[in-house]
Image (tube, rainbow, N blue to C red):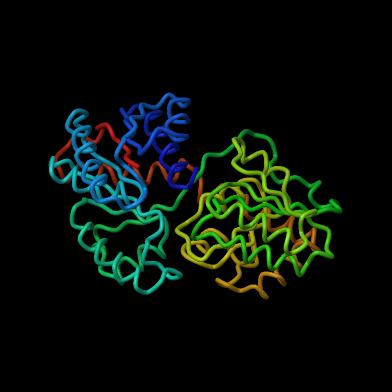
Amino acid sequence: MGGASVHLLDLAQGMQELGHDVTILVGGSGLVVQRAKARGLSCIPVKHLVREIRIFEDFRGYFEIRSRLAEITPDIVHLHSAKAGILGRFAAKSLKIPCVYTAHGWPFTEGVSEGKRRIYKLIERVMAGLCSKIITVSDYDRAIALDSKVGSAEKLVTVHNGVPDLDSRSLSKDDREAKELIRLIMVARFEEPKDQKLLLEALSELSHLPWVMEFVGDGPKLESMKELTVELGLGDKVYFLGSQGDVAANLRRADLFVLISRWEGLPLTVLEAMRAGLPVVASNVGGVNEAVIDGETGLLVPRDGKLELERTLCRLVTSPQERLKMGRAGRSRYSSEFTFEVMRQKTLMVYRDVLSAESSNDQSPVMGVR
């Protein structure tokens, strides 16, 4: 699942644990529905909510969402992802239900083509008027929204992503210091905005060093990246693990987390790596530098910076003490700034602000749509 789906399920379960009634509407009937039901969450598939732009299907999706909202009569609707954010805001507005939209990274951020950025800005300016609050997952995203005139300063609020902690076992293990073969890991889907291609090209210049690389995730670009791995002569050093049910276990076995992207919001996988006590090498895009402190909890490289990425990977692969120090600092920063409880409380405050403005009971049920 993508980060927005993980975020949605964590938040829905967290609100339900506080005693709120939560219903999720989600496009399709795949993995999100399965995992929602496994967590004891009420999850209703929306047949006509599809990711691609299909005008006829999107009209049907709007009416389907509107019909479901009319049946459920929630006190507040919380929307996630672009398509659900558009259709859901129209539907909630038509029923006079207050809604909140979380932007998990804007489609007009740096790294997106200029033509697309202009179009998306116009769309989001219109849509901003249809919701009570817009949550951005980073200060960076809030700033570019304000600069693009997408929402007012009062409407836009930053709530940094957070991830639930694991059990009490130590996640920053000293045995990472003495390993001869360094295990690198990237957890991300093989699609835009991730840049596994650049990472593979950088690693091809470091094939003489003692490392193995694990890619966790699937997606439309997976097969082409496998082909590139063979072309670069990295077949014996790079492993594609596909989708994994227990990513935390993969992170526990790793020594260094890598996330190379062209654009981001505030990626959950970076927070999961910090939670696991891993040093992070990541592209300095979006809100990544609000989580990763360059030189303290990891190292940041510029977008498209192949040479800088090579140098950074070489530095940490060959520096066990630095890896261990950064990993411990990352774990400490996660514990103080990016726990799920902090995110949940700040999100609940947004709900209460919206419901207070609507003269509603602040113990009202909540609902997520994706």
The x and y percentages for residue 212 are 77, 54
* Residue 353 in sight: no
What residue is shown at x 30% (from left), y 36% (from top)? 367
Front residue of 251 and 227 = 227
Instruction: Reply above or below: 74 against 175.
Output: above
Q: Is residue 257 left or right of residue 351?
A: right
Asked where in the image residue 243 lies, by quadrant, the reply is top right
What residue is shown at x 74% (from left), y 55% (from top)? 324
What residue is shown at x 56% (from left), y 50% (from top)? 269
Asked where in the image residue 173 lies, by quadrant, the reply is top right
Instruction: Reply above or below: 16 against 126.
Output: above
What residue is shown at x 21% (from left), y 45% (from top)? 59
Instruction: Reply above or below: 224 against 56.
Output: below
* Residue 208 in sight: yes
The x and y percentages for residue 130 are 18, 53
Q: Quadrant of the C terminus?
A: top left
The x and y percentages for residue 364 are 24, 32
The x and y percentages for residue 318 are 81, 63
Front residue of 355 and 304 = 304
Q: Is residue 35 left or right of residue 183?
A: left
Front residue of 183 and 289 = 183
**How many numbered callouts?**
0
